[in-house]
Amino acid sequence: MSLNRMRIRTTLGAAVACAAAATVGFLAPGTASASAAAVTLPPVHAGFDYQIGGAYTPPAGVQVVSRDHSAAPASGLYNICYINAFQTQAVGDPGGPDDWDQDLLLKDGDGEVVIDPDWDEAILDITTDAKRRSIADKIKVQIDECAAKGFNALELDNFDTYTREVVEGRITASHAQTYIRILSAYGHDKGLAVGQKNTVELAPNHTANGLDFAIAEECGSWNECSRYLSAFGNHAIFIEYTDAGMANACQYGDRVSVVQRDVNVSPAGSGGYVRKTC
């Protein structure tokens, strides 16, 4: 299972942001699922816990929790189901590159599978309609699992894969948005709200992409929190991993959910566990 998706920004950031901005407003009409209005969004400014590194009894005051799709939802709470939707699991792990059709993995100029070096995960090749739909069919199995278990929403991770330096422009913002619209429409049809994970440069286009609320890591560290609020209003969840980032994110703590976790998102009771609120 992938743990947190904290990313080091690359020198491609400015170019990516410009390309993404150019994409906004030029998507095909009718891309958001008609059933989106029927889903229930997370309660605003609620106590939140990020448990994608392992499930445990939520602390007192928590109303919303995010857990991996392989876990059970927390009883009586609003539950967000984490899915690694744009990359495989790590090399050698269940769901890793060997468990995928090799034609669905992005290749470099030498025909080698492109690996995200931060997480040892292969990049899924969403550059053609046929591949997007084949990949989506596999991810839909996990979405079905989330719905069957009683989760309320989806966290589709690595929307920002196209910004990775290792991808070198092979995947574009347009590819990412076309693909996520397939998944968000399917999630809505299953009665699940769909969160936009990070990728602030595409936040203005969230309605067309079928994305209902934001889950943002380190917006305080990167001074991006206000940009999420501009797009999503108070329907946002902020996760920080440093004291400095938390201090910045807590400027918005009277409006949205904010939590600080340790970088490994460790379960309570294990070494390194950190959880702080504003």
Image (cartoon, grey):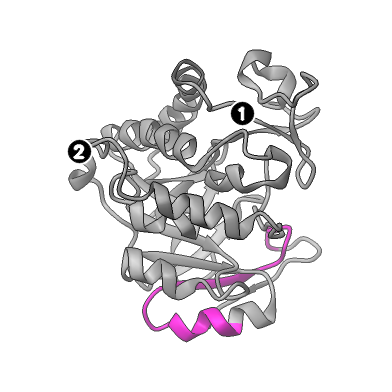
- Residue 7 placement, left or right of 200: right
In the foreground, 173 or 99: 173
Which residue is drawn at the image coordinates 49% and 43% (left, top)? 173
150 relative to 5, above or below: above
Where residue 47 appears, as percent x and y from the top left, is 44, 71
Q: Secondary structure at mark 2?
A: helix
- Residue 103 placement, left or right of 271: left
Kindly report which numbered mark, 2 or 1, lies closer to the viewer in this rendering.
Answer: 1
What amino acid type is highlighted by mark number 2? Ser
What amino acid type is highlighted by mark number 1? Leu
Q: For the magenta stretch, what is the residue range?
A: 247-268
In the foreground, 45 or 196: 196
**Rendered image quadrant of residue 121:** top right
Q: Which mark is residue 138?
A: none
Which residue is drawn at the image coordinates 60% and 43% (left, top)? 161
Where residue 3 appears, as percent x and y from the top left, is 68, 49
Which residue is drawn at the image coordinates 75% and 44% (left, top)? 119
Circles 2 and 1 in contact, beta carbons < 8 Å:
no
Would you name the residue on which mark 1 appears? 124
Where residue 233 appears, as percent x and y from the top left, is 31, 69
Q: Is residue 19 visible?
A: yes
